[in-house]
Image: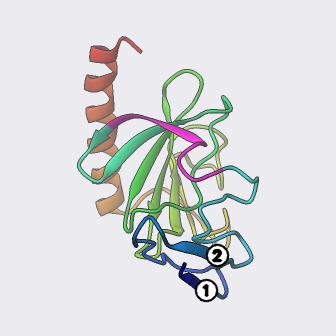
């Protein structure tokens, strides 16, 4: 039997958990449960959200608990998620870095900040590096593209 100890500091990073089925692995996790396979709320990765559609690197997801909470972490580096609310409208678009941590969230629907909707929150935490009204040209193009693709897919799925 092989025991592989990995020590992760800070927010952690993806650990590439491959190996033979006979390996037994133990993970000591960072403060937010990074790369442990378990969320802060004690749920296994992959059980908090259901994928409804995917457009390239953008996954449209719905929280299994019925809320519209945006994903904080992902096992796929560089992933972009569009989270739908109970009305199947895209509420958030979140961007994740190479370590799978959230780095930016665009609120498309919901409460206005600084009088603006959509607006952008930068950082892992919701407002870690500030909230900015409006969108950059690049973000505006991406948001419009995702919303258009979602509306087409939504009609096919009768949502």
Numbered disc 1: secondary structure? strand
- The Cα atoms of the two marked residues, 1 and 2, are separated by 6 Å
Residue span colored magenta: 44-53
Residue 6's image quarter?
Answer: bottom right
Q: From this viewpoint, which residue is outermost toward the front?
A: 1
Image location of residue 15, percent across then percent down: 48, 78
Which residue is painted at 67% across and 58% down in the image?
39
Numbered disc 2: secondary structure? strand
Q: Is residue 159 left or right of residue 44?
A: left
Between 32 and 133, which is closer to the camera in this rendering?
32
Image location of residue 156, percent across then percent down: 27, 16
Which is more N-terminal, label 2 or label 1? 1
Q: Is residue 23 left or right of residue 6?
A: left
The residue where tag 1 is placed is 5
The residue where tag 2 is placed is 26
- The relative height of residue 143 versus residue 21 in the rendered view (above or below) is above
Number of residues whose C-alpha sits closer than 10 Å to that of mark 2, classed few (under 14), some (14–19) or many (20 or more): few
Which residue is painted at 68% across and 77% down in the image?
29
Q: Quadrant of the C terminus?
A: top left
> Badges 1 and 2: C-beta atoms under 8 Å apart?
yes
Magenta includes 151? no
Image location of residue 116, percent across then percent down: 57, 49
Which residue is painted at 34% across and 53% down in the image?
140
Image location of residue 90, percent across then percent down: 47, 35
Between 123 and 114, which is closer to the camera in this rendering?
123
Between 101 and 152, which is closer to the camera in this rendering?
101
Number of residues whose C-alpha sits closer than 10 Å to that of mark 1, classed few (under 14), some (14–19) or many (20 or more): few
Q: Is residue 50 left or right of residue 128?
A: left
Residue 51's image quarter?
Answer: top left
């Amino acid at each position: 039997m092989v025991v592989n100890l990995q020590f992760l500091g800070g927010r952690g990073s993806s650990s590439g958990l491959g190996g033979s089925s006979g390996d037994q692995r133990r993970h000591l996790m960072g403060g937010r449960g990074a790369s442990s396979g378990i969320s802060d709320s004690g749920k296994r990765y992959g059980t908090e959200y259901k994928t409804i559609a995917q457009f390239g690197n953008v996954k449209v997801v719905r929280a299994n608990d019925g809320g519209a909470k945006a994903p904080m972490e992902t096992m796929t580096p560089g992933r972009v998620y569009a989270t739908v609310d109970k009305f199947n409208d895209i509420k958030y678009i979140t961007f994740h870095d190479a370590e799978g941590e959230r780095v930016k969230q665009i609120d498309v629907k919901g409460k206005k900040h600084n009088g603006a909707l959509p607006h952008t929150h930068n950082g892992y935490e919701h407002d870690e590096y500030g909230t900015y009204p409006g969108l950059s040209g690049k973000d505006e193009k991406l948001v419009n593209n995702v919303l258009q693709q979602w509306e087409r897919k939504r009609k096919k799925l009768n949502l």
